[in-house]
Amino acid sequence: MALPRILSERLTIPAIAAPMTTVSGPELVIAACRSGVVGSFPTHNAASTDQLDHWLYQIHAALDGSGRRAAPVAPNLVVHRTNERLRADLDCLVRHRVELVITSVGSPKPVIAPLHDIGCLVFADVAGVTHAQRALEAGVDGLVLLTAGAGGQTGWANPFAFVRAVRRYFDGPIVLAGGISDGTSILAAQVLGADLAYLGTRFIATSESNAGDDYKAALIGSTLDDVRLSTRVGGIPASLLASWLALDDAAKPDAAESGAAETGADDSAGFAQERLLRNRTAWSAGHSVAGVDAITSVADLVDTIAQQYAQARHGLFGRLVDGGPSAGPQVLPMAKH
């Protein structure tokens, strides 16, 4: 199944700037969409539904006046029962006739009919095969596969196994999340069977993100060895920087957890929206933090990734045509030690 035209015809690279609590705001979304990447943000980043309404007007006004057909905006809606703003935020998205919504934490079923009625596509975050099957039964149009190494709310599965398992029964849009940092890894995700890549961590260290300077500096100074799995922020497993966990322990000695988080299930019983919002200053990061070595603009970041993606495609298809080994794609250096 081909990607919907609203995505395939408006993207510079096949990617979504993932929704990130606190980090993703109108400036980041506008810059991503102008650069040809789907711009997403959690609706709870707006302080109220009224502010969400204002943000959507602001974003669409900026994109309509950009002089080019921008990539879609994809608000992220937490559909868990503890989200007291769910109905109000959903009504706001419907009024604005958004093109794409990404749901998280819980069943998307209650929001699908109203969104489909306005022609909106609904993609759902899923962390396992059973979770994916339930989302499809509810009627979603696409899946975001949260695999091991995704920043923030994360999954536990190996991406190779997860994508191939879902592709056995689903031929619709698949977005792969977890450890994707450059154009080569985006192409690898497509070869595996995904249509789009989720990039969050790389977009934190941009001038348009709402992350603080200390957070951005911590990303630049970290490797994937500095990422920890913790349930501290929202009650379900999330990838966080060890440096933030240490700071939180120092500020709140009772915060340290007394056991490893359970993974592998789609049970969201431990999640609480209010708990997530209490910890909205947490420093999330995925394994792709290894690719963050400087603060750039969104436009420069997307341009770099687009160059890497083109070079990787050239290298891959050159090997296929030549029928023999080659030096492979000469991607721009990204390694951090």
Image (tube, rainbow, N blue to C red):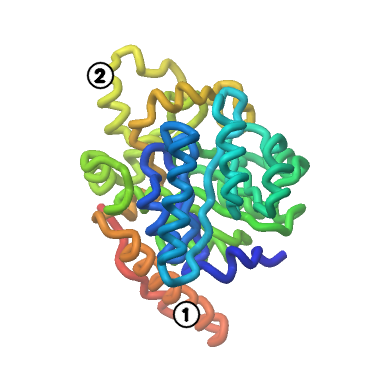
Residue farthest bottom in this picture: 322
Residue 320, x across and y down, in percent: 56, 81
Asked if residue 185 shows in the view, the reply is no
Pick the front one: 252 or 319: 252
Residue 324, x across and y down, in percent: 53, 83
Name the residue located 73 percent from the left edge and 49 percent from the top edge.
Answer: 117
Q: Secondary structure at mark 1?
A: helix
The alpha-carbon separation of the residues under discs 1 and 2 comes to 50 Å
Name the residue located 70 percent from the left edge and 42 percent from the top edge.
Answer: 114
Residue farthest top in this picture: 254
Tell me: residue 137, above or below residue 242: below
Q: Secondary structure at mark 2?
A: helix
Front disc: 1 or 2: 2
Is residue 272 rendered to the left or right of residue 29?
A: right
Is residue 92 rendered to the left or right of residue 35?
A: right
Pick the front one: 186 or 156: 186
Residue 293, x across and y down, in percent: 26, 55
- Say what amino acid the circle numbered 2 marks: Ala
Residue identifier under label 2: 251
Tell me: residue 53, above or below residue 305: above
Residue identifier under label 1: 314
Asked if residue 92 shows in the view, the reply is yes
Pick the front one: 258 or 271: 271
Is residue 258 rendered to the left or right of residue 273?
A: left
Name the residue located 44 percent from the left edge and 75 percent from the top edge.
Answer: 310
Number of other residues with Cα within 10 Å of mark 1, as a class: few under 14, some 14 to 19, many 20 or more = some
Tell me: residue 38, above or below residue 25: below
